[in-house]
Amino acid sequence: MSSKTINIPLGSQHISLLEPVRFKFECENEKIIGVDADVGFVHRGIEKACTTKFKYDGIGYVVARICGLCAITHSLSYTAAIEKLLGGEISQKAKYLRILLLELDRIHSHMLCLSHTCENAGFEAMFMRIMGDRELVMEIQELLTGNRVQFDFISIGGVNRDIDSLIAKQIIEKLSLVKQKVLGYIDEFSSNWSLSLKFKGIGAMSLDEAYRFNAIGPLARASGLNIDVRNEIDYLPFDEVGFKMQTHIDGDINARNIVRLNEILNSIEMCNNVLEGLPEGEIFTKIKGKPKGETVMRFEAPRGELMYYVKGNGSAMLERVRIKTPTFASIPAFSHIFVGQDYADAPAILASFDPCLSCTAK
Amino acid sequence: MFTSFIKALKNLFKKPQTIDYPTTPIVKDKDYRGLIEYGEEECIYCLKCEKACPPGAILFVPVESPPKNEKNKKGLKYHYNPHLCIYCQECVRACPKPDEALWQSNKKPPIGIKDDKVNENWFELEKLKQTSL
């Protein structure tokens, strides 16, 4: 540190943060010229617990508790990895129901992120509005799974609950309401003056930088990088339900918000397609055996690629469970974006990354 | 400007989005995942629920005066910890006689206060289970 610069911390406890993370900014006047990040504040030793405390068939419920927002993606990735090891095939209906929950998860996670960016830009009323409308999605999830946050919907061999026509009708009604609201937000996010002032041209990242710094998820797609795990895997039939890649070219905070809003619209369309074209059949097929060997499973969490590595030795206890979360992979990109920005914009930029620290530290 | 003024006026007289909780009761869905309930007479003591439970919230512990059931040859008694339970329904799916011996209700769990000695009592049961194995 030279004598002309000063260090200003952001976190670990800060009014703009949802979860504990510490950034140390090296500032020259108002400009940030260096960043140091520390993410390990909520370490709970879940990876170790998975190999010492719990048997392989209960771990799906353990990893779901890593994060409240992407609980479904975690349990789905783990379960899919175990199913791959055991060599079992699940029914088409279970696959469709898994997509439905995955997309609902994405909708409510993106809505939380959008509301949070609004709050950090000082637009408290918009924050309240989006959080209020997010309740609709939470109600849908409660209808489907019986709980608001911890869904426990996915188990090895299929899903735990079936869906009937009454619930499907209610879900479609509520989703059409959410769609109207989201169309309203797109209007607001692209034309509202106070949001534009904080968002447009701030925290920009070019396509080349996104590629070089290993950005993933909405962060990369906002810079025009065509990267989405849903496009690359064939484990779940994403093509059949109408998945479309959403990208933007600007790479700033506004672009990230627009990408998220478009993804919500795409997810709503996918949910409707799932409910309309839901195949008949069993929701659960029993898969027997003990996991032996190693495998890697990837899924697109709301924040980007989530990777699970599972290694078993033929007994009920696993040898290794490694979880690579999207926020962890994006830290180099985060740190790069901060450089050259004003310190006053740092909370708004940080919220636009949608960091999930309890996932990262696990 | 004019439309936002009208919107603001309308918002003043709109109902709040939240529920006025103690006066207005919260409607509970019938499929809400709540307490696990147990039918002692129907139980066949196969202990499948105990093995299936991820957090170990169900324990069958040998006691001096066990419930009278011809299937209960080892003199076990069912114990359930609602504060440890994650309400995942794994036990009900493992049960050979669901809805009769073990089922999930939509009731809320009790509040665990210090005087109930929720933890201490449960740790003792866990020790008993360990010694009986």
Image (tube, grey):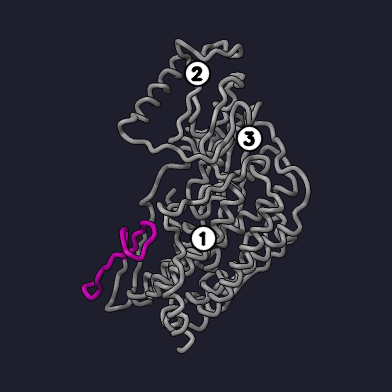
Secondary structure mainly formed by the magenta segment: loop
The residue labelled by disc 1 is A135
Give the chain of mark 2: B
Can residue A359 be seen here?
yes
The residue labelled by disc 3 is A291
SS of the residue at dot 3?
Answer: loop
- Please, which residue is most extreme toward the bottom here? B2
Image height of A105 relative to A54, above or below: below
The residue labelled by disc 2 is B77
The reply to whether the magenta stretch includes residue B110 is: no
Q: Where is residue A154 drawn, in percent x and y?
A: 61, 45
SS of the residue at dot 2?
Answer: strand
The residue at 68%/62% (across/down) is A270
The residue at 56%/54% (across/down) is A306
User: Which circle, 2 or 3, is nearer the viewer?
Assistant: 2
The residue at 25%/73% (across/down) is A5
Please determine if labels 2 and 3 lie on a single subunit. Answer: no
Give the chain of mark 1: A
In 3D space, how far apart are the residues under numbered discs 2 and 3 (Cα atoms)?
A: 33 Å
Image height of A160 relative to A264, above or below: above
Q: Where is residue A250 drawn, in percent x and y?
A: 53, 79
- Please, which residue is most extreme toward the front here? B23
Query: Would you identify the image quadrant in which residue A12 lies?
Result: bottom left
Image height of A4 relative to A68, above or below: below
Query: Would you identify the image quadrant in which residue A19 lies?
Result: bottom left
Q: Which residues are magenta?
A: A1-24
Location of the N terminus of chain B (image quadrant):
bottom left
Say few, some or many: other residues with alpha carbon within 10 Å of mark 2 (under 14 / 14 to 19 / 20 or more): some
Q: Where is residue A290 drawn, in percent x and y?
A: 64, 31
